Amino acid sequence: MDSHDWLDTECAALEQAGLRRHLRTVMSAPTGTINLDGRDVVLLGSNNYLGLSTHPQVIAAAVEATRTFGTGASGSRLISGNSERYTTLETNLAKTKHTEAALVFSSGYAANTSIIPVLADGDDLILSDALNHASIIDGCRLSRATKKVYRHCDVEHLKTLLSESTAFRRRLIVTDSVFSMDGDIAPLRDIYEVATHYNAMLLVDDAHGFGVLGKDGSGTVTHFGLEGTDIIQMGTLSKAVGALGGYIAGSRALIELLINKARGFIFTTGLPPATLAAANAALDVMCSSPELRQRLFLHAKCLKTALTDLGYTVLPSETQIIPVVLGSPQQTTSMADTLLAEGVFAPAIRPPAVPPDTSRLRLTVMATHTEAEIQQAIAGFATVFPKTR
Ligand SMILES: *Cc1c(COP(=O)(O)O)cnc(C)c1O
């Protein structure tokens, strides 16, 4: 018996359940049409919502920063890795988010798994939406706090859970703003009122709202007119901003404590100069380009309407994320394979990313798609539909 035999057994079990994952190789930039494993296909699976990762101004900033400052940060931010580009970026983020301060982490995943254990520990309670992102779930686990999960976007359930749990030292409500696999928007105004009433902290993960919702793309909190409140905003620089990194925007006191206690901030190397410079340049373009958001929403509406008319089960998303639910993991991967053969890349999303029996194609559009590409995608879906009946 080999002590590693169980690895193959585990993979075989995943295969059996239709849950095995495989890597694909993208051989071009994430534009409307990509080269995937050697074939050109319309891309409906990128979070590069505004196309900023290939924007000439953004690329120029990244190249210039690399020439001047090299490729790596060479140290953690508290030792030698904290460059001027961080200061500029954090100042710009705080300004965009209407908060006193902001702090950049290596990724959105690191931001969530770092901040939650700082805000809550064994004496505290976390109230978490049932469909929150995995990085929030992992942050809750690391915190050792008691966790109660409220039904998706159900403010009454949240209220009940809060009223039943008064014995805790601190209470933290955490929610995605735009849900990553559903594209719906959390009722932030109601959640904020409940948080205020019960004196609970509120942390909002704006990974998919930043760059897309609110004035100048500043995000979901602005979309609801809640800027200037004490809502703690988490977000990422890896989606609409087209670079890499996560951030927390909030009060100066919060940022100060994170610098001192957030383990995913302290014990890791700073981001490369190119990444920070790209994020900075992208932020400028993002804030000054409302036409990108208009195009994004136009494409989303067009695709949603066409797929619904064709008879697909499209969840009522309000954003650029368009979930087409098929049910079983097997049905979903089979549909994704058929679409790929038609030249449309629509990623299959299966448990544990989504609840059992809700496997889906998670489609996303980009401002940089052309109308022809959106029509090509719709034609692919039209061809494929009868075969699945
Ligand atoms: C993508 C995502 C993250 C993680 O961000 P990365 O920068 O990719 O690590 C966190 N929360 C949500 C809701 C996300 O969709």
Image (spheres, grey):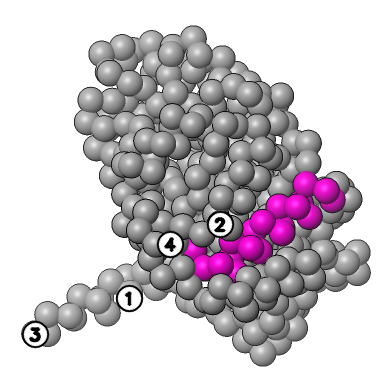
- Label 3, ligand 1: CB separation under 8 Å: no
Identify the residue at image location x=51%, y=50%: 104
Distance between the Cα atoms at labels 4 and 3?
A: 47 Å
Residue 81 disc label: 4
Q: Earlier in the sequence, mark 2 or mark 3?
A: 3
Residue 1 disc label: 3
Q: Earlier in the sequence, mark 1 or mark 3?
A: 3
Residue 186 on the magenta segment? no
Identify the residue at image location x=54%, y=76%: 70
Side of 197 where 260 appears, left or right: left
Identify the residue at image location x=85%, y=69%: 373
Q: Element at badge 3?
A: loop
Mark 1 lies on residue: 12
x and y, in percent, of residue 93 in the image: 62, 44
Q: Which residues are magenta?
A: 271-289
Callout 2 crowding tier (Cα within 10 Å): few <14, some 14–19, many ≥20: few
Identify which residue, 59 or 120, lies in the foreground. Answer: 59
The amino acid marked with disc number 4 is: Gly
Identify which residue, 25 or 22, lies in the foreground. Answer: 25
Identify the residue at image location x=50%, y=14%: 196
